[in-house]
Amino acid sequence: MKKRKFGLALASIFAAGSILAACGGGEEKEETTTGSGNGSTEETSDFSVAMVTDTGGVDDKSFNQSTWEGIVEFGEANGLEKGNGGYDYLQSAAESDYVTNLNSLIRRDFDLVFAVGFALHNAVAEVADQQKDAKIAIIDEVVADKENVASIMFKANEASYLAGVAAALETKSNKIGFIGGMTGEIIGGFQAGFEAGVASVNPDIVVDVEYAESFTDAAKGQQIAKRMYDSGVDIIFHAAGGVGNGLFTEAKERKQKDPNANVWAIGVDRDQYDEGQVDAETNIVLTSVLKRVDVAAQEVAKLALEGNFPGGETITYGLADGGVDLADSRGAITEETIAKVEEAKQQIIDGEVTVPEQPEK
Amino acid sequence: MSKRVVNILVPLISILLGLIIGAIVMAVSGFNPINGYVALWNGIFMDTYTMGETIRQITPYVFSGLAVAFAFRTGLFNIGVEGQLIMGWLAAAWVGQAFELPAVVHVPLALIAAAAAGALWAFIPGLLKAKLQVHEVIVTIMMNYTALHVANALIGVISGGQERTDSIHESASLRSPFLESITDYSRMHWGFVIALIAVMIMWFILQKTTLGYELKAVGFNKNASEYAGMNVNKNIILAMLISGAFAGLGGAMEALGTFENMSKLHAATGIGFDGIAVALLGANQPFGVLLGAILFGALKYGGLNMPSEAGVPTEIVSIVIALIIFFVASGYIIRVALERFGKKRKEEK
């Protein structure tokens, strides 16, 4: 009995093989002509650029998406087309996919490959050692001592400081919330800047800080947002990727039930205004802390195109060079507050105010 | 139709049906199914690199499949393989980076630590089931979450507040320059040998030992086993321990092979949950599990190439792969249909 089952299963594997092989026959030729010759170093006339997402996916309404928007803009400006030899992306479903996807793009001869997010650190380090001719740029993380890797960092704490100033001036309950993704240095920067910004306006305001310990769990985000709003918080800033979608859902639901409810959310990474649309007139997004990943991606791509790929270097984008900023509030913030925010912005650029990089323990 | 022909036809037809329905899904969504399947095939067999990576992908599935299957044979639904795997991963990663030992000692020590950590995580639901009749499904599901967050917190402690543990020492690594050289730097590692040994061990325990006989007896009928003088509670706990140990070893494959460290996880790895499907595909037989894992892992890894080469989006790829697995798992329906068909033909003659 057992033998028969074994044989049966074995047959199924072979069957799968032969069927697939049969399908493959006709296509083989085309395959080799468009082929992605392994590690070939020949110069292509056109510049091509691609990116690997983290597990959030390319439409995460956050980091991956902004990088992709930057790449698309770069591609269109330079007359590239989506696909081989132009621009493209690969999504990672699991952490074990990072190395595979990086390798796969490099084998397809993309001149520059972006790795989005700190989660790809090890994968980038590993691939960079094996594929010496590849150029990789990692976003939001430093991969040190690799000649073919450029690291792109953002002073998120500076823009978060401005968000803190705006929130502290706009709050009516003097209670403000912060939802973090996973505890660590990166989100710590957001928290530290935000808290410092709030304290610079009014040290008595309580900032309610909670981490979701996830970047994807929207349900958890909604749970935290619910608790915060229930406790009287009226403005919540999230630095938590997909978790933030739960915050927007909660805020929108409250606004729908009671149009006079004073609930606001501050978005992160990209302008999240669209996520806060309740109806044609109402929106619960106060502003967003922008990491201009798109700007950075375009600039690094441009550098690489010109042959000045900043391999082995760390480029940090801050308020001064437009790499981070606050999004247009579209009338949600009063003119006075905006003036104060601009003032704080100038102070940071001039170096009169130094924004802390990590929260006080 | 002879039995033998049916036995060969059933899997053939099920895979063919899966491929056809998958092709229809792709065609309806506006993608060329032939390009899609060529990309899937190339993703698995294109060169030594993809083949090495495919084996790398299959390895942990073997363990998670064995873990689920082993508990199933004793009548237990171990849904907590995911959590046990995470604990095993953490234990192996910690042993790998904390000690400096010769490889002959280091690798087995890391493996034993992983198996022990997985077994410990499975011991709690086993104990609760045996002593207090708490249903193991509930406890194991809950312990997946505790494992995830305990592991994340411990990674912070071990690494001094970093996002990931340090890389393991080379002496604990299952990777080898030899495997790298024959597979063009894939992450394939010696774990596949350990996986094959684990398959043999499970077969041996179940078929050749008194323990295995008792475990299976408890799985068939708890009351009858007790009446026959077997210690049911002891067997339940033992089954969970062994199942958890398999799961923990699956985690060790990630720690000592694929990643060589452990990063904080945003969500479950999915390997443990896929193990349920792998076990069912393999009819809870050790060698069946091996084949199930090969099918599952190969499709999963090959599927990665479909967005890249054929432009089929990840979501459609998941649907196509799920369809193929669905039809393979529902081979019974095809068997019945074939037998009916065969009978009719005979009558007509």
Image (cartoon, coloured by chain):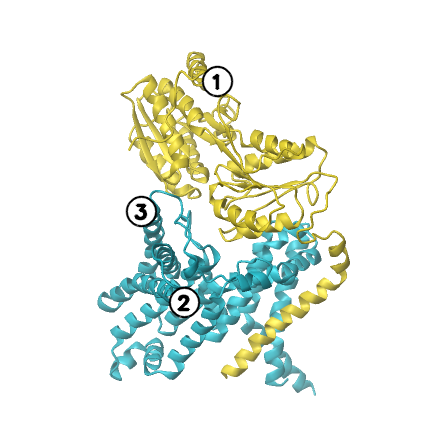
Chain colours: A yellow, B cyan
Q: Is residue B52 above or below residue A5?
A: above
Pinpoint residue B79: horizontal percent, then vertical percent.
38, 62
Both labels 3 and 2 in a single chain: yes
Q: Is residue B31 left or right of residue B274?
A: right
Q: Chain of mark 1?
A: A
**Quadrant of the frame with the C terminus of chain A:** top left
User: Label 1 sits on what residue type?
Assistant: Gly
Q: Is residue B4 left or right of residue B168?
A: right
Both labels 1 and 2 in a single chain: no
Q: Disc 1 and disc 2: Cα gap in Å?
A: 57 Å
Q: Is residue B154 above or below residue A351?
A: below
Q: Disc 3 and disc 2: Cα gap in Å?
A: 31 Å
Q: Quadrant of residue A47?
A: top right
Q: Are marks 3 and 2 in contact (CB under 8 Å)?
A: no
Q: Does the rendering let one see residue B32?
A: yes
Q: Secondary structure at mark 1?
A: loop
| Label 2 neighbour load within 10 Å: few <14, some 14-19, many 20+ | many
In this view, the mark in front (3 or 2): 3
Q: Is residue B258 above or below residue B330?
A: above
Q: Chain of mark 2?
A: B
Residue at image location 44% in from the left, 73% down from the top: B197
Name the N-terminal-most of marks 3 and 2. 2
Label drawn at residue B68: 2
| Label 3 neighbour load within 10 Å: few <14, some 14-19, many 20+ | few
Q: Does the rendering let one see residue A235?
A: no
Residue where numbered disc 1 is placed: A331
Q: Is residue B154 above or below residue A333?
A: below
Residue at image location 69% in from the left, 44% down from the top: A83
Q: Chain of mark 3?
A: B
User: Label 2 sits on what residue type?
Assistant: Val
Residue where numbered disc 3 is placed: B157
